[in-house]
Image (spheres, rainbow, N blue to C red):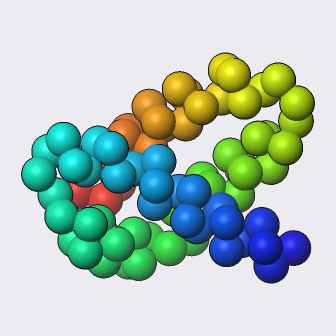
Amino acid sequence: MLTAFIMGYCLGISSMMSSAGRNGIPLAELREAARRRRLLVTGFGVTAYLLLLIPFVTLFLLPALVLGGAELRCRELS
């Protein structure tokens, strides 16, 4: 259970990193913004982590995860 929360938080941040990098936002600033909205980022990441455990869902979920991370960063963490 604890692993899902830790991995979920890391997965939530990593899904937002590509969008932040393209917009010139440093990783330290992204992590600080994610720290302020920790529950939101963790909820997004845990949901994605649990869905990634289902076989063959990964093929469809990974592109959606990157898009969702970009949308989360733009709307909630800006």
Left-right relation of 64 to 57: left
Percent of width and height locating residue 5: 72, 71
- Is residue 45 at least partly visible in the picture? yes
Which is more toward the observer, 51 or 56?
A: 56
Question: Quadrant of the image for the N terminus?
Answer: bottom right
Percent of width and height locating residue 13: 46, 60
Picture mark count: 0
| Residue at the image point whose x is 58% and y is 67% from the top | 9
| Residue at the image point whose x is 53% and y is 57% from the top | 12
Question: Quadrant of the image for the C terminus?
Answer: bottom left
- Is residue 43 at least partly visible in the picture? no
| Residue at the image point whose x is 65% and y is 62% from the top | 8
Res. 53 image quadrant:
top right
Which is more toward the observer, 68 or 55?
A: 55
Res. 32 image quadrant:
bottom left
**Compared with residue 32, is residue 41 higher up or lower down, i.e. above or below?**
above
Left-right relation of 9 to 27: right
| Residue at the image point whose x is 55% and y is 36% from the top | 65
Percent of width and height locating residue 49: 72, 51
**Compared with residue 69, is residue 46 higher up or lower down, i.e. above or below?**
below
**Compared with residue 69, is residue 34 higher up or lower down, i.e. above or below?**
below
**Compared with residue 41, is residue 17 higher up or lower down, i.e. above or below?**
above
